[in-house]
Image (cartoon, helix red, strand yellow):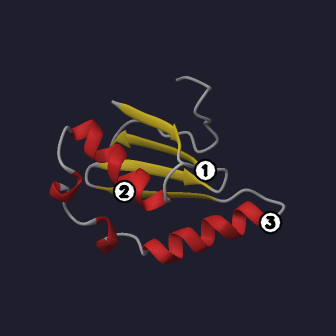
Amino acid sequence: MIYNEDCSEVPTITAIVEAVAAQDGVDPMELEPPLFDVVDPDALEAILSTGATAQSEVTITFEWAGYDVVVGSDETLVAKQQGAHVNPSHRPDDGF
């Protein structure tokens, strides 16, 4: 299953947790390990906001709770179960 969304409506960290929880059909509080054990939320937001104001786009990719997560400074988010190919240049309206 693939979650591919514009995450401009909520903080990036919230969007990531909600995306993975929705795909697993669990409460976000049940996800292990907690996201903050894998990624520093403040650092993630700072890096993405720097990319949003710079001339170039920033994309961050990491693994969490059995998912490959790709988030960009253009507020896109892709979360795929590990093992599936994640295209960091993918946009929500592109389709797979």
Q: Which residue is the extreme one toward the front?
A: 9
Provide the secondary structure element on which disc 3 rests: loop
Q: Amino acid at mark 2?
A: Glu
3 or 2: tag closer to the N-terminus:
3
Provide the secondary structure element on which disc 1 rests: loop
In this figure, which residue is indicated by the disc labeled 2? 63
Locate the N terminus by quadrant: top left
1 or 3: tag closer to the N-terminus:
3
In this figure, which residue is indicated by the disc labeled 3? 54
Provide the secondary structure element on which disc 2 rests: strand
Q: Which residue is the extreme one toward the top?
A: 95
Residue appearing at x 73%, y 56% in the figure = 57
Q: Choose mark 3 or mark 2, whichever is in front.
A: 3
> What numbered label is drawn on residue 75?
1
Against 2, residue 6 (above or below) is below
Q: Amino acid at mark 3?
A: Ala
User: Within the image, what quadrant is residue 52 found in?
Assistant: bottom right
Q: Nearer the viewer, residue 68 or 51?
A: 51
Q: Position of residue 42 (x, y in %)?
A: 49, 76
